[in-house]
Image (cartoon, helix red, strand yellow):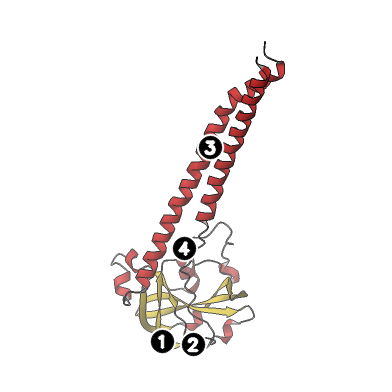
């Protein structure tokens, strides 16, 4: 007859696979999912760098007749000439540059009569006043076409009444400044003087890419679970051999 302790041990071993196997499968699938995301992220970065290496496009190539955007223009270089409407300058808050707090200067550029595109001229320090912005009149902007991203989970809401902007909502900005903007923005490249404000070249083409670390973590947990169960089962077999004649 088996010892009571052995019976209890045996009962645990009998039920453990029903919990260990699903947990092991889930951990492995999470690791595979992270590898898939890593592949997609690397493919996206490669595509963006390829687009940035292509010759500049025109705004007409980026906006369809119906006003919709052309996806192929996203992250393409562009050169646009028009009149900067400095009286409609806005600050995009909570932006950093070389670990310094500040904002981005947003100004509409009239490229044709009744045709306006929002330009991100670059970063300014936190104590910068919009009244210090002196660029106005005709200007040629060399930059990168971007389609504004949606509001993030932790991004505050815009407050047009207080002129506080945390993300680019073109519909809301159009209403605030009284002109209808094209559905794209231009992020200006850095100028000949890298220290002149606003500091251009704020286009970010690198994204957080920790998927390999996450994948290793999930696979590691799966391995630890498998080894732990194997050692437990091995101990059970030793105990059984010692208890059963």
Image mark count: 4
Mark sitting earlier along the chain (4/3): 3
Q: Nearer the viewer, residue 169 or 53?
A: 53
For disc 4, the neighbor class at 10 Å (few under 14, some 14 to 19, many from 20) is few
User: Earlier along the polypeptide chain: callout 2 or callout 3?
Assistant: 3
**In the image, which is nearer the foreground, mark 1 or mark 3?**
3
Side of 190 relative to 19 (left or right) = left
- Element class at badge 3: helix
Of residues 140 and 13, the one drawn nearer to the viewer in this rendering: 13
Q: Position of residue 204 (x, y in %)?
A: 48, 70
Q: Residue at x 32, y 70 (%)?
A: 62
Circle 1 crowding by C-alpha within 10 Å: few under 14, some 14–19, many from 20 = some
Would you place residue 29 above or below residue 124 in this image? above
Q: Which residue is mark 4?
A: 149
The nearer-to-camera label among 4 and 3 is 3
Q: Which residue is the site of mark 1?
A: 139
Please, what secondary structure does the residue beneath circle 1 have? strand
Q: Is residue 101 above or below residue 28?
A: below
The residue to which callout 3 is attached is 24
What is the quadrant of the N terminus in the image? top right
Q: CA distance from mark 1 to mark 2?
A: 9 Å
Number of the front mark, 4 or 1: 4
Tell me: residue 38, above or below residue 56.
Answer: above
Tag 4's secondary structure?
Answer: loop
Residue 49 visible: yes
| Numbered mark located on residue 135 in the image | 2
Distance from label 4 to label 1 (Cα)? 26 Å
Quadrant in which residue 92 is drawn = bottom right
Q: Position of residue 5 (x, y in %)?
A: 71, 19
Tell me the distance, in whole angstroms, between the alpha carbons under discs 2 and 3.
61 Å
Tell me whether circle 4 and circle 2 mark residues in contact (CB < 8 Å).
no
């Amino acid at each position: 007859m088996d010892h009571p302790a052995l019976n209890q041990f045996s009962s645990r071993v009998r039920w453990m696979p029903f919990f260990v196997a699903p947990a092991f499968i889930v951990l492995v699938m999470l690791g595979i999912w992270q590898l898939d995301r890593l592949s997609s992220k690397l493919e996206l970065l490669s595509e963006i760098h390829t687009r940035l290496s292509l010759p500049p496009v025109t705004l007409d190539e980026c906006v369809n007749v119906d006003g919709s955007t052309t996806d192929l223009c996203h992250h393409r270089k562009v050169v646009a000439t028009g009149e900067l409407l400095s009286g409609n300058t806005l600050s995009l808050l909570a932006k950093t540059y070389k670990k310094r707090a500040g904002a981005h200067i947003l100004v509409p550029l009239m490229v044709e009569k009744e045709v306006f595109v929002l330009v991100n001229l670059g970063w300014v320090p936190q104590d910068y006043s919009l009244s210090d912005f002196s660029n106005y009149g005709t200007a040629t902007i060399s930059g990168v076409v971007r389609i504004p991203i949606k509001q993030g989970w932790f991004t505050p809401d815009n407050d047009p009444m207080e002129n506080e902007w945390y993300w680019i909502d073109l519909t809301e900005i159009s209403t605030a400044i009284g002109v209808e903007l094209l559905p794209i923005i231009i992020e200006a490249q850095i100028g000949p003087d890298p220290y002149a404000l606003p500091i251009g070249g704020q286009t970010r083409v690198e994204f957080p890419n920790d998927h390999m670390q996450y994948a290793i973590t999930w696979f590691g947990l799966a391995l630890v679970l498998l080894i732990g169960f194997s050692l437990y089962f091995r101990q059970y077999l030793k105990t059984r051999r010692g208890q059963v004649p």
